[in-house]
Amino acid sequence: MTYLPTPEQDELRAMVRELAQERIAPRAAAIDAAQEFPWDLKELLAQQDLLGICFEEQYGGTNLDGVSQAIVAEEIARADATTSLIPIVQKLGALPIMVAGSDEQKQRYFPRLASGEWLIAFALTEAAAGSDVASNRMRARRDGDDYILNGSKRFITHGSIANVLTAFALTDAEAGGRKGMSAFIVETDSPGFSAPRVEHKMGIRGSPTAELNFDDVRVPAANRLGEEGDGFKIAMATLDVSRLGVAAQAIGIAQGAIDAAVAYAAERRQFGQRVVDFEAIQFMLADMSSQTEAARQLVYAAAARVDAGVTDIPYWTSSAKLIAGDTAMRVTTDAVQVLGGYGYINEFPVERMMRDAKITQLYEGTQQIQRLVVARQLLARSGVPARG
Ligand code: COS
């Protein structure tokens, strides 16, 4: 067992850090202000082979290990959280296919996703079904060799720009969401599909979060993932792994805020000395840095366990997302404090980072859901029955 990064992981970090500093960080403020998806940076990441990191080589990917994938997300998020979502959501959307897809389905979609030619989104959440996934209402009715999808989805990251979705719908409404939901691959040029609305958000403002409508959308049965009724478990198995992407994003945002706070405190002078010379500020910076490091190490430990296929993956990935998200919120809030009034205005990046950090406590399961998952795993691990 080694706790040190490999030379390849160090090299990867240095490469992505340089790219992010030179090409992504200078764009971050404008992406946030314009609320526009950074197509230029999507192309840049595709050219650098950074959208194929989670795909196997046979599909044109680079198949990086989990720690390396976390490093990529982290280093991009350190410069810009919106842009870090491009590889993160490419994996999130593809995970249901990785979990339950056939070789033929993988062959059909993964090469275009790995190259970045196509974007994918994960369409699970509905207006009335957020944390409570099982209360989903969207329907899929079998019609010959097809299914016909009707309903709507909400809060779908990249939903309005994706070429393809992994979408969840009830094939057996009576059985309900836990047993009657199925997963489908849906191409967004299918007649009846639309993305009528994009949300105005507090943070990650360049990343379109869309409402999706399915009005008699015909999907070939060959695009169903797994068997009818497997949808809930496919969604859970996806989130079990994808939560690590958000955790890595969170530590990247936190690190970006620490870097900005240190740089500012080293320049700014008050009461005849540098702000960084005040012990009060040094202690804040020390807390910010040590907490971020602790979160980072937990993310890597969880990533290594996902790769190893341990049986308690949800314990590790939900713990990592919980700690990393809360750390990002605390650290970015403290970074604004270190900059004082300058932290509150958009001349400096920390106010954007604080707004961006908030979403990591909300999406891919709120922090309350992470605690619920961790507690259930803890009780199971301790041999305590789920119900008394
Ligand atoms: N992996 C595999 N199977 C799982 C699972 C997991 N992580 N979690 C639950 N299941 C299984 C259970 O074992 C159970 O199977 P059986 O019916 O065979 O016993 C079934 O799924 C139902 O599980 P449970 O009763 O625990 O479901 P709940 O409705 O209580 O939901 C939570 C569990 C709350 C964990 C789930 O709804 C959840 O993750 N919600 C958050 C959703 C989310 O992250 N949304 C964001 C979307 S992306 S932005």
Image (cartoon, helix red, strand yellow):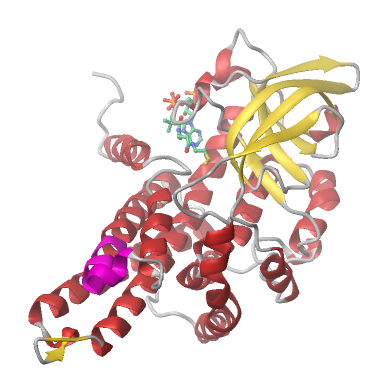
**42 left or right of 252 in image:** right
Examine the rendered structure and indicate whether residue 253 appears above or below residue 6: above
Identify the residue at horizontal 81%, vertical 57% (top origin): 112
Residue 336, located in which quarter of the rendered image? bottom left
Quadrant housing the N terminus: bottom left
Rendered view: 210 above or below 213? below
> Percent x, y for residue 44?
70, 73
Residue drawn at (82%, 22%), measured in percent from left and top? 147
Residue 213 visible in the current orientation: yes
Q: Quadrant of the C terminus?
A: top left
What range is drawn magenta here? 332-344
Q: Which percent across, then down, holds residue 81?
A: 50, 62
Q: Residue furthest top?
A: 174
**Residue 225 visible:** no
Q: Nearer the viewer, residue 219 or 172?
A: 219
* Residue 167 occupies quadrant: top right
Measuring from the top left, give residue 67's x and y in whole percent.
Answer: 49, 68
In-image side of 13 versus 221 (left or right):
left
Please name the residue shown 61% across and 7% down the image.
174
**Residue shown at the point (75%, 67%) measured from the top left:** 57
In reply to whether residue 249 is colored magenta, the answer given is: no
Give the camera-side residue of 33 and 222: 33
